Structures are given as C-alpha cells and as structure tokens.
Image (cartoon, rainbow, N blue to C red):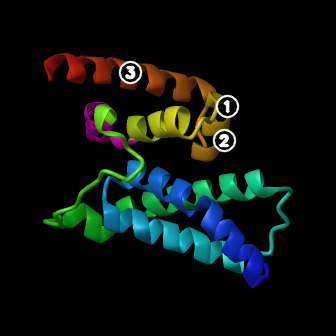
C-alpha cells in the first residue's frame, strides 16, 4: 500500500476505528494503542481489499482483536490503572451526554455492540462477523444492553 493511499485511509477511518476501540477498551490509552497497532498491521498486510468499506471492516476487526489481546495480558489482569481519562469523544453532543455516559458504564460486550449498531450503523449480521459471534448473540446483547440502559437512565 502506497503512502498516499495509506494516508487517505488513515484520515478517513481513524476516528471510527478509535471510537470502536474506545467503546471496547473503555480506556483512552488502550484504545490509542489498539488503533496504532491496527494501522500498523494495515501497512504490513499483503491483503487485496475490494473497496474502502472492506478496509474499514478489516481495521475495526483488527482493532477489536487488539483490545481483546490487551485484556488477556498479564498487565491488565493484575494491575489497576489510576489513569484519569475523559472518555467522552468530541462527537458527543451535550444533550446526549447522559446516554453516552450510560453506554460507557455497560460491560464491554454490550458497549461494543451498541456502539457498532447505533453509532456506526452496522447491521446485526455485520457486527456478528466483526466480533466473530452469531447474529443471535448480537441481537441478545443489544436487547440486554437496551434493558440495562433503560434501568440506568430511570435511576438518573
């Protein structure tokens, strides 16, 4: 992949890949690492991509896998982070802040499907492929996430 094409792809998809990684990791620094690793792997790959959407899906899948690998690491299992982060990306409007905060409090498996479905516009089948789970699992996670959000927002 040439520098100009890589630059165009990075500018086009880095925000989307970062938001997905952030919703999965719930840590700004981990999300940044996952995105960096995903784009590095894009530079190194010999895959022939069909179109830009194929590249976008591939980047999201790689970033999610990077996040999963971080969760499996010794460091993340045994060290508590005292990092003070603001998890709120710039694309969130003030009136939707409560909803965003509630989504970010969900467990990772619910948070990611909600983000991919509502914020990125992926279908359940597409999310299933990205996360390597069944479509019915995606639908179940979405329903459970909606129920948890409803409970959280009633309490607020």
Q: Relative to residue 18, is residue 150 drawn left or right?
A: left
- The residue carrying mark 2 is 129
Is mark 1 in CB contact (under 8 Å) with mark 3? no
Q: CA distance from mark 3 to mark 2?
A: 21 Å
Q: Position of residue 70 (x, y in %)?
A: 39, 64
User: Tag 3: Cα neighbours inside 10 Å, few (<14), some, or many (≥20)?
Assistant: some
Quadrant housing the C terminus: top left
Q: What secondary structure characterizes most of the magenta part? A: helix
Please name whichever residue, 44 or 13, is drawn nearer the observer in this view of the structure: 13
Instruction: Give the SS element for disc 2.
Output: helix
Residue 22, compared with residue 98, is above or below; it is below
Q: Position of residue 25 (x, y in %)?
A: 37, 55
Check if residue 111 falls in the magenta segment.
Answer: no
Picture residue at 54% right of the left edge, 29% below the top:
138
Is mark 2 in CB contact (under 8 Å) with mark 1? yes
Which of the numbered marks, if any, corresponds to residue 125? 1
Q: Relative to residue 24, is residue 66 drawn left or right?
A: right
- The residue carrying mark 3 is 146
Which of the marked residues, 1 or 3, is nearer the chain's N terminus? Answer: 1
User: Tag 2: Cα neighbours inside 10 Å, few (<14), some, or many (≥20)?
Assistant: few
**Magenta segment, which residues?**
97-108
Q: CA distance from mark 1 to mark 3?
A: 18 Å
Q: Relative to residue 20, is residue 39 drawn left or right?
A: right
Picture residue at 80% right of the left edge, 75% below the top:
46
Check if residue 100 falls in the magenta segment.
Answer: yes
């Amino acid at each position: 992949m040439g520098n100009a094409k890589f630059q165009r792809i990075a500018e086009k998809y880095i925000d989307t890949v970062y938001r997905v990684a952030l919703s999965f990791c719930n840590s700004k620094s981990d999300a940044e690492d996952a995105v960096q690793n995903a784009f590095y792997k894009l530079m190194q790959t010999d895959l022939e991509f069909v179109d830009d959407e194929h590249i976008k899906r591939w980047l999201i899948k790689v970033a999610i896998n990077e996040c999963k690998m971080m969760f499996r690491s010794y460091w993340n299992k045994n060290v508590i982070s005292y990092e003070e982060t603001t998890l709120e990306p710039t694309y969130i409007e003030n009136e939707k802040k409560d909803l965003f905060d509630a989504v970010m409090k969900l467990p990772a498996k619910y948070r990611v499907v909600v983000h991919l479905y509502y914020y990125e516009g992926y279908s359940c089948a597409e999310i299933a492929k990205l996360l390597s789970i069944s479509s019915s699992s995606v639908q179940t996670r979405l329903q459970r996430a909606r129920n948890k959000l409803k409970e959280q927002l009633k309490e607020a």
